[in-house]
Image (cartoon, rainbow, N blue to C red):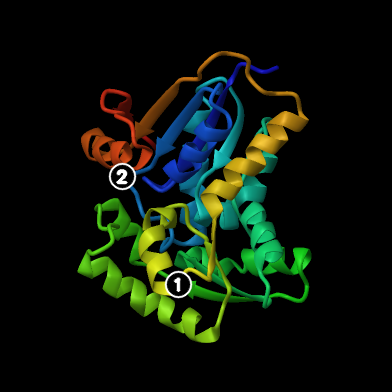
Amino acid sequence: MDQRAIGVFDSGLGGLTTVRELKRLLPQEDIIYFGDTGRVPYGSRSRETIIKYARQDVAFLRTFDLKGIVIACGTVSTTALDLLAAENPIPVLGVVEPAARAAALATRSGKIGLIGTQATIRSGAYERSVAAANPGAAVFPQACPLFVPLVENGRFHPGDPVIETVAAEYLSPLKALGVDTLVLGCTHYPLLEEVIGAFMGPEITLISAGAEGARAAAVQLQKQDAMAKRPQGTHRYFVSDDAADFSRLASLFLREDVTGEVQQVEIG
């Protein structure tokens, strides 16, 4: 038993896809979330800048007494996970390997599509992880740099002509290749799941990196007998930019009011 909180961070709103799954799987756990909304997106930054920002995010979360940190950011998971895990005395978990394993198991044809930020696609991390789990599978990557800023501005609803046009442009090559599994390699992208699913078709299996990362974290806590024992956990949210904008979108996505639970902090 470990009553300490779980820390979760992302460049902005997208990591709430991981928080939502953690809350479903582990309702008794306290969760502290940090969204670096003042510096979103990370995906177009250099490797050095991503590492710098990620270290600062972890340093902020480590001001709390945590039993582990989940990197709910595909970009940081592909770029800095090993470094952050080596630098910190508590477990630091990412979203890439769990999502890659799920895709490797789900594919029937061996054709796996991958959408992510420019940094995630550039890293080749998914290709390596899929190859380790299913050597016969092929990964077809597609960078989607406009998805994160559109999601952060609330443009993720079906029927929105802007996001539907952008999605069609990004996803058309993957649909033409005949992929049967598509990895949503950025934790922002599940907010676009309806738009993506409608374009790709119902026969395509969508794998959420954020949800798979949350499931892997839950399994690890169970294995380590580190689960909390309380009737209901608490949830605290911190951001590096305006709290009101985050609260509005977070409440919509989490399907619960987080107004008053979000605090703006200085970072870096």
Q: Give residue 182's position: percent from left, percent from top.
A: 54, 68
Q: Give residue 244's position: percent from left, percent from top.
A: 22, 34
Q: Give residue 65's position: percent from left, percent from top.
A: 56, 20
Identify which residue is drawn at 77% across, 65% down. 132
Q: Quadrant of the N terminus?
A: top right
SS at mark 1 in the image: loop
Residue furthest out toward the top: 230
Residue furthest out toward the front: 202
Residue furthest out toward the bottom: 176
Q: Residue flagged by tag 1: what amino acid is it?
A: Gly
- C-alpha distance separating marks 1 and 2: 35 Å
Q: Quadrant of the C terminus?
A: top left
User: In front of the other: label 1 or label 2?
Assistant: 1
Closer to the camera, 217 or 83? 217
Closer to the camera, 233 or 24? 24
For label 1, count other residues whose C-alpha is less than 10 Å away and answer few (under 14), some (14-19) or many (20+).
few
SS at mark 2 in the image: loop
Q: Earlier in the sequence, mark 1 or mark 2?
A: 2
Q: Which residue is mark 1?
A: 201
With 131 as the anchor, is 92 left or right in this view? Answer: left
Closer to the camera, 120 or 154? 154
How many numbered marks does the figure carry? 2
Q: Give residue 225's position: percent from left, percent from top.
A: 75, 24
For label 2, count other residues whose C-alpha is less than 10 Å away and answer few (under 14), some (14-19) or many (20+).
some
Identify which residue is drawn at 52% across, 34% down. 24
Identify which residue is drawn at 24% across, 53% down. 153
Identify which residue is drawn at 32% across, 24% down. 261
Q: Residue flagged by tag 2: what amino acid is it?
A: Gly
- The tag on residue 38 is 2
